Image (spheres, grey):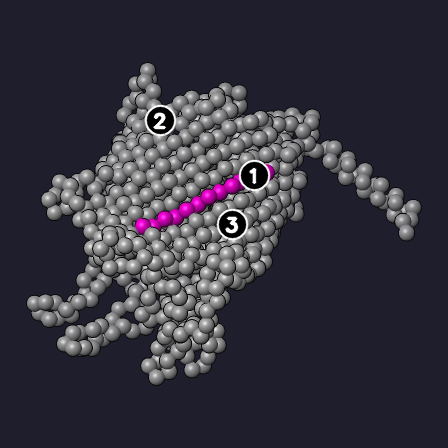
Amino acid sequence: MITKKSFFLFIVLFISITTFAQDKFTLSGIITDAKNNETLIGVNLYFPDLKIGTTTNEYGFYSISVPKGDQNLSISYIGYQSIQKNISLTKSSKMNWALTENGEMLNEVVVSDTKGRANTRTPEMSVNKLSISAIKKMPVVLGEVDVIKSILLLPGVTNAGEGASGFNVRGGGADQNLILLDEATIYNSSHVFGFFSVFNPDAIKDLKLYKGGIPARFGGRASSVLDIYQKDGNSNEFHMNGGIGLISSRLLAEGPIVKDRGSFLIGGRASYAHLFLKLSEDQKNNSAYFYDLNTKLSYKINDNNNIYLSGYFGRDVFAINKSFSNIYGNSTLNLRWNHLFSDKLFSNLSLIYSDYYYGLDLDFIGFNWDSGIKNYNIKYDFKNYISDNFKLNYGANAIYYNFNPGTIKPSEAGSGINPDQLDRKYAFEPSLYIEAENKLNKKLTVAYGLRYSMFYRLGNSTINFYENNNPVIFNPVFQIYEKATPTSTKYYSKNKTIKSFDNFEPRFAVSYQLNEDQAIKASYNRMLQYLQLISNTSSPTPLDVWMPSDNYIKPQIADQIALGYFKNIRNGDYSLEIETYYKKIQNRMDYIDGADLIANEAIEQVVLNGRMRSYGLELMLKKNEGRLNGWISYTLSKSEQQTPGRIPEETGINYGEWYNSAYDKTHNLAITSAYHLNDKWDFGANFALQSGQPVTYPDGKYNYLGVDVPSYGLRNRNRLPAYHHLDISATLTPTRNKNRNWKGEWVFSIYNLYNRQNAASINFRQNEDTAANEAVKTSIFGIVPAVSYNFKF
């Protein structure tokens, strides 16, 4: 029963809340680049007197609740001049802002340089963001700007091997990274077998790497998320830019479809190093090249609705003497609709298609091989700016997968190869999520969320069944694992559920701000990975085959905790970030000795479910201001794997003990710097040092029919030599004729300045002359000088 006293208290509370709401107004809008109307992601808006702030989302939108009256506003973004302005709020208002790149001036507001300060205001941690302008100043192999190689200079990130575009995050495998381009999944991020990445830097707007504290809107991988967005295109005026290098060139065009409302972007890249092979008689039938295409259309229907259509298409071609050819690459397409329900509720609906194709023609054998993975994804995301202290994100998505493990066709009528189609596999992965960011007081902010993911392995497939449900058996006599023989099979018709999973994935992060320049943070996240990569190498190669979890191969479950300290020094001139983490992964696949992975219809017969763990300490010291800036990062870490026996009689892998994973790099040091001498000359340098990659060397040999056969010991007990190199670059910007729109620059670079012969692998053989055993190191790069010319008009 409601008493008069409780009713009176309710009325007082309601009046208080109403009065509070009336004392605050919502400030919202879009922030863009002043020159091209490109929306800017992650711009900081801060009211220093109120000590409240927010950032723009992936589409440049912001919303914040502010008390009425005159307020001081600060808007800042790395690489752009910040804005300091006093605004007067008498009602909820929309205010769009245009930021100007450093070097140009604004008239109506006070401007100051933006510094790359450490984030001490939000719970976001284990996140690194790199600007494209900084990436383009880094010296790289053959002068080609590479997005993937640039993140190898960050703490907790190592390479997957010399010359590979894959990367490992906090001791995880390259297959455990979710790579997104405009929300579409990229399954293979490399060109030319790992020498270059698939991302054209001219088309990229924003890049963010989540190593931990991963928001609930992301799922599907166990280690990290690399979230990349393409530019929208210039809606003010037409421009072109590009570059000419030693082995490839690129060209990008952008301009308005309807001025200030619609824009287009189209960019292409192609290599031509294979043309030089034709100059040699021995190599005239050989080819090795890539090409890719980035496209995007953007249109502003009205103040509350925007649509985007973006795509990517890339292919690699590799051929030897017309007897062997290989074509592989990614294709993506994404149609998006942004809708603003109110000044506090923003939504994005996406329809996404992603395809990875791998084709192999072996004419000397007489067959063609095709494989790949396709997915169709629909996702609907909402961002609700409830108040300046409380923000809510929620949404849903559903992905349908089509896996092609392999199609074999005879290449000619007289071929002895019979056509065959390995069982196609299908799966469906729906999920829901909700996450909140809640500022409890001036110092304490928490972010918490929950993702509910489901996964259904679907027919049309024939499934094997085994005695005791074990597709792998242990031979106690020879102490080895062997393939089990199926006891029966069962056919599942199309879309019938073979196996289903469902899991909750909690996420939590907290930040305590010691003062304006210092904060401590902690985070926890659980991630589920339902797709498994079948590969016999530690770095991603095109022949890798993806497959879904099923009756025998379980989804990977990753739990990670992290603790960090963040500090800005000298008002942000310097910043320090220190993090420590611990991650464990259940159901990490391991292979039995002698596993046959290619064209294997019963892959469950050669894999075991194990577990991984990794832990480490990361440090990053940045210099954000002055002619000389850059950072030093160092990571001390350990990554291990364990596959124990299922019963006491089994040995497991390495006798069931923890052993170094293929991604274990105890020490990882990176130093990167950029020096601005004057308007004509800029210089850059990178130094990288990593512990050698774990490998397995033979520990003996035996003679079989007169042939010496090596005998291998326990897995990954040895290491390749330490990996290190120093790279330098110089950029010359000639004096520009003010009457011409043409802007050009020359980039001179030297990769591996002191010609370090880093080992990609070490093989053991018997010397033909001396009969002595010897180790032979294979190196991919020595010193590599390069020059390229970039232009814009």
- Amino acid type at image mark 2: Met
Q: Which mark is residue 240?
A: 2
Q: Residues within 10 Å of mark 3 (few under 14, many from 20)?
A: some
- Amino acid type at image mark 1: Asn
Label 3 secondary element: strand
Q: Which mark is residue 399?
A: 3
Residue sticking out furthest to the front: 413
Looking at the image, residue 263 lies above or below residue 571: above
210 relative to 86 in the view: left or right: left
Residue sticking out furthest to the right: 4
Q: What is the CA distance from the residue labelled 2 to the residue labelled 3?
A: 36 Å
Residue 333 in view (yes/no):
yes
Q: Which is closer to the viewer, label 2 or label 3? A: 3
- Which sits in the foreground, 28 or 395? 395
- Amino acid type at image mark 3: Ile
Q: Earlier in the sequence, mark 1 or mark 3?
A: 1
In the figure, residue 649 lies in which quadrant? Answer: bottom left
Looking at the image, residue 480 lies above or below residue 230: below
Q: Position of residue 791 (x, y in %)?
A: 31, 28
Q: Quadrant of the C terminus?
A: top left
Looking at the image, residue 603 lies above or below residue 791: below
Label 1 secondary element: strand
Looking at the image, residue 729 lies above or below residue 761: above
Q: Which mark is residue 348?
A: 1
- Which sits in the foreground, 792 or 650? 650
Residue under the point 30% across and 47% down: 327
Q: Position of residue 554 (x, y in %)?
A: 48, 64
